[in-house]
Image (cartoon, grey):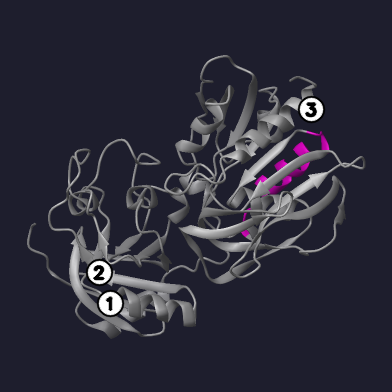
Amino acid sequence: MPAHAPAILVLEDGRTFRGDSFGAEGETFGEAVFNTGMTGYQETLTDPSYHRQVVVMTAPHIGNTGVNDDDPESSRIWVAGYVVRDPSRVPSSWRSVRTLDDDLRQHGVVGISGVDTRALTRHLRERGAMRVGISSTETDAEALLERVKASGQMAGSELASEVSTTEAYVVPAVGEKRFTVAALDLGIKAMTPQRLAERGVEVHVVPATSSLDDILALSPDGLFYSNGPGDPAATTHQVEVLQGALAQGVPYFGICFGNQLFGRALGFDTYKLTYGHRGINQPVMDRTTGKVEVTAHNHGFAVDAPLEGSTTTPYGEATVSHVCLNDDVVEGLELKDADGALKAFSVQYHPEAAAGPHDAAYLFDRFVKLMSDEKGTD
């Protein structure tokens, strides 16, 4: 491994950690969050939902399997910074083509290693996610702290337009085409449209700025909203588009950020979690079946909806369909018509299993069935 310069990490409350530079040398700022996944660091780094966030990995050894060209979920690394305890000195995997350190350097991502990530994680759990700075060019913690306090907040930030595709593209159906879906890219991961394509769905991925007319021009059988970064309360255009689609009866499926925007379209508020859910080991109950699934999460905001009973909306009756068993956070919503037929649904987590368990793959089948029922086909 190349020699690494000393580095410093300063939280906005003044807590300071010192270590070694990992990845690119320089300085970076963002919101400090922690991820509990023991694997899948490539998918985490390339998940656009982590835009403007500095990710602390709770697993002590990161980089063991190196980096390959098959697992990225987008064309670049999106995290604002990366914090690990013990980076692997020598990766070991037949799929590896370079080290994680080299990959971070190549993408200009500033990180720090040799940090007591357990102490840092405990601090964030007790005090909440907060702004942070990492620097290998500054040695004065007080000077870096001033720049941390001057950096942007996550609350109130509209970030989906910064990570979305600028041009529409198509992911063709695998085998016989059964349905057409318009997928609004709010920070979509590559595996998500692939999961739909495997079920005979032709996916038209469109920019986050697309209008309702743009979407309807595709004559879609369904509308999909992806995961993505930022504050859902600051993301208003996409909520209005979704309300228009729901009013016209277009079947809808949303994940993560798409769940939060669905909640706001139905009239619910959203709020910022103290430290969020990030990892691939979160237990969630599907209240429609009573089954518990282990799921992959990456969210710092949640929907404020009543866990019991239904809520009458202009589009039908809304209920909470999924709940996190750790803290009762809303993890899914359903919308039904007056006859009790499902019209739209969403989940707060990532069912495409990249990275993560496969427990929630049934949700893609549920979306296909929803479109099939709407068209009256088998």
Q: Residue at x 24, y 45 (%)?
A: 67
Please report the bounds of the magenta region as a residue range.
234-249
Crowding at mark 1 (Cα within 10 Å: few <14, some 14-19, many 20+): some
Crowding at mark 3 (Cα within 10 Å: few <14, some 14-19, many 20+): some
| Image location (x, y in percent) of residue 194 | 49, 31
| Image location (x, y in percent) of residue 29 | 36, 67
| Image location (x, y in percent) of residue 111 | 26, 63
Instruction: Answer whether residue 114 is visible to the viewer in this image.
Output: yes
Q: Main secondary structure of the magenta part?
A: helix
On whether residue 74 falls in the magenta region, the answer is no
Query: Mark 3 or mark 2: which comes first in sequence?
Result: 2
Q: Amino acid at mark 2?
A: Arg
Q: Residue at x 18, y 58 (%)?
A: 88
Please give the residue where the numbered disc 2 appears in the rendered image: 85
Q: CA distance from mark 2 to mark 1?
A: 6 Å
Please give the residue where the numbered disc 1 appears in the rendered image: 116
Please give the residue where the numbered disc 3 appears in the rendered image: 374
Q: Secondary structure at mark 3?
A: helix
Q: Amino acid at mark 3?
A: Glu
